[in-house]
Image: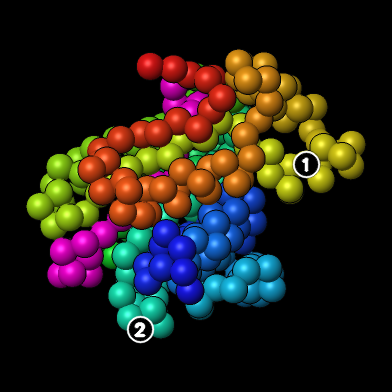
């Protein structure tokens, strides 16, 4: 297959829908072979019907050892791993004092622990090959302080901070580490929820606020996030590392 990413291989976590599926579709369009990680067999089957993935893995990546299994299976299927896209996440967005121990743990697990474990799982392979692209999906809300996002931001802030350390530590192995931080993104799932009229009022308020602070006057799209991920996965970004790139229509600047 021809394209800017021809010959490249990638793992994409959180692959079942929204931003994750958009990233998979863009990477495949650009020529990469993509291995998708989801949390259920049904999710993986849905991805496989929508995109020509090279393989897939089902598991709870925040748990010890599961990400190591993902890396082993992906290497066996793809032959090598060039790119890891840590997209898996999904925090509980709620006022700080309404969080419970369970929702706090889920927010940290889904966003931070999953990213840490997947990154550590693929790094030895990338170091051995003297090449790799680590790309995390972060959050613009870390800078804007969006309503009800404090605990989510605690997890995503850790994701952002980790990449600067990784960028310096593994630069001599030709491994770059960057974060793509979108603002509110109108995924097909959210669009359908709002169209149904069943969206919780608090969620509507959060989304309205998130859109109101965007100078370009609209939310982002999965394709716009995916375009930046594809750029970071390719050769043209080889001198970019340790950066957080905000895909946010100007919601935060500088």
Residue 126 included in the magenta stretch of the image: yes
Q: Which residue reaches farthest bottom?
A: 76
Number of marks in picture: 2
Residue 69, compared with residue 23, is above or below; it is: below
Residue 221 falls left or right of residue 178: right
Q: Residue 28 in magenta? A: no
The magenta segment is: 125-143
Residue furthest out toward the left = 172
Asked if residue 171 lies left or right of residue 63, the reply is left
Which labelled disc corresponds to residue 209? Answer: none
Res. 191 mark: 1
Helix, strand or loop at label 1? It is helix
Please tell me which residue is depicted at 37% across the width and 48% down the height of the picture.
Answer: 232
Q: Is residue 231 visible?
A: yes
At x 60%, y 16%, the residue is 215
The numbered mark, 1 or 2, whose residue comes first in the sequence reads: 2
């Amino acid at each position: 297959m021809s394209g800017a990413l021809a010959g490249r291989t990638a793992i994409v976590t959180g692959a079942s829908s929204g931003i994750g599926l958009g990233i998979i579709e863009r990477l495949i369009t650009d020529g990469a072979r993509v291995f998708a990680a989801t949390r259920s067999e049904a999710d993986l089957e849905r991805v496989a019907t929508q995109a020509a993935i090279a393989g897939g893995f089902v598991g709870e990546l925040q748990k010890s050892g599961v990400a190591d299994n993902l890396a082993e299976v992906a290497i066996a299927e793809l032959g090598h791993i060039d790119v890891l896209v840590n997209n898996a996440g999904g925090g509980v967005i709620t006022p700080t004092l309404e969080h419970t121990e369970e929702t706090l743990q889920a927010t940290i697990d889904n966003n931070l622990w999953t990213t840490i474990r997947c990154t550590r799982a693929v790094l030895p392979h990338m170091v051995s090959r003297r090449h790799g692209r680590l790309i995390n999906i972060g959050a613009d809300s870390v800078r804007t302080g969006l309503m009800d996002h404090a605990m989510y931001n605690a997890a995503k802030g850790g994701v952002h901070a980790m990449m600067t350390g990784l960028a310096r530590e593994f630069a001599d192995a030709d491994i770059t580490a960057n974060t793509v931080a979108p603002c509110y993104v109108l995924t097909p799932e959210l669009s359908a929820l709002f169209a149904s009229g069943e969206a919780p009022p608090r969620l509507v308020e959060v989304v309205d606020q998130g859109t109101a602070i965007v100078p370009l006057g609209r939310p982002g799209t999965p394709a716009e996030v995916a375009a930046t991920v594809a750029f970071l996965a390719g050769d043209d970004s080889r001198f970019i590392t340790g950066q957080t790139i905000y895909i946010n229509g100007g919601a935060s600047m500088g």
